[in-house]
Image (cartoon, grey):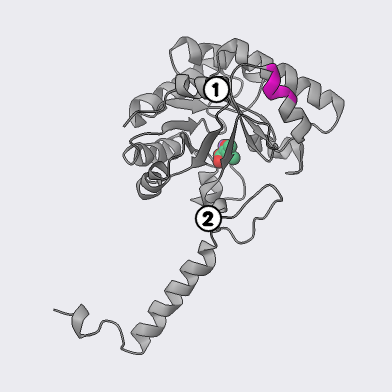
Amino acid sequence: IKKITTETLRKMKFDKEKITMLTAYDFTTAKMVDAGGVDAILVGDSASNVMAGFETTLPITLDHMIYHAQCVVRGVDRALVVVDLPFGSYQSNPEKALESSVRIMKESQAHAIKLEGGSEVEESIRKIVNAGIPVMGHLGLTPQSIFQFGTYKVRAKEDEEAEKLLKDAKLLEELGCFALVLEKIPAALAKKVSESISIPTIGIGAGPDCDGQVLVYHDMVGMNQGFSPKFLRRYLDLYTEITGAVSEFVKDVKAVDFPNEKESY
Ligand code: KIV
Ligand code: NA
């Protein structure tokens, strides 16, 4: 199997081949997502919501992220594995940002880290890239800043924020990021950003002109019933499938239909 590298993704943008990324947080899921053929797997801090049941991404710790990353790496043969730096492990502290990134790379053997923000995290990105660690950026709706935003609505609809985003995207490229996520921004702005930089953009709620697309695995397989933003396409309705299977099991056991003779020793 030919492993995907940051260079592969760069070349895909050059060749105008779309890049695919999904999240995974555990071994079994990572194996399926890798077998399905995505180019990159994101061990997102969305694990805070999806795995741990928190309201936001803020509570998840670096130790938790490393545990999820270790589990994912053991299941992946082909995809590039990218791990989110969690809230509090890098902001406003370049030394700490480098330390956190080194821990992720050493302890999980993932291939790259991702962090949120533009000029605010410039020094951190510089340090991490200088250490030889590939960095993915993340602009637009950056969920670790939710209490500053106050809402999960579309970002950068106004000129001022859009201009800062475009500047930040160019800065991230200059700093040596190998790609960047654009989350929940107008499609026209995402197109403009994607055309203005040579590193790939990977969109979520950012229209069709990004160089790639990312979704949260649990959302795209329909495990999260309550979450249905307009950008989400559900490929399965696993919530219904799984609760249905569970209630069948309950029914069969109560009826002493399971296990039957063939299922017994
Ligand atoms: O944590 C995450 O799942 C993410 C994606 C939504 C890009 O950052
Ligand atoms: Na994230």
Location of residue 15 with respect to 188 vertically, above or below = above
Q: Is residue 58 visible?
A: no
Disc 2 to disc 1, C-alpha distance: 29 Å
Q: Secondary structure at mark 2?
A: loop
Q: Quick one: which residue is furthest to the bottom in this view? A: 255
Height in image: 6 above or below 78?
A: above
Q: Picture quarter containing residue 140?
A: top right
Is disc 2's CB within 8 Å of ligand 1? no
Callout 2: 10 Å neighbours few (<14), some, many (20+)?
Answer: some
Front residue of 227 and 145: 227
Ligand 1 sits in quadrant: top right
Q: Where's residue 69, x and y in %?
A: 40, 37
Q: Residue at x 46, y 34 (%)?
A: 39
Q: Bounds of the magenta span?
A: 192-196
Question: What crowding class fits label 1: few (fewer than 14 Cα within 10 Å), some (14-19), or many (20 or more)?
Answer: few
**195 part of magenta stretch:** yes
- 86 vs 235: above or below: above
Numbered badge on residue 221: 2
* Residue depicted at x 34% and y 83%: 253
Q: Inspect the magenta stretch and tell me whether residue 3 lies in it.
A: no
Q: Label 2 amino acid?
A: Val
Q: Main secondary structure of the magenta part?
A: helix
**Mark 1 belongs to which amino acid?**
Asp
Viewer can see residue 12? yes
The percent position of residue 239, horizontal first and vertical second, equals 53, 64
Left or right: residue 66 versus residue 61 is: left
Q: Is residue 209 left or right of residue 6?
A: right
Q: Secondary structure at mark 1?
A: loop
What number is the disc on residue 15?
1
Answer with left or right where residue 245 lies relative to residue 148.
Answer: left
In percent of width and height, residue 164 lies at: 77, 21
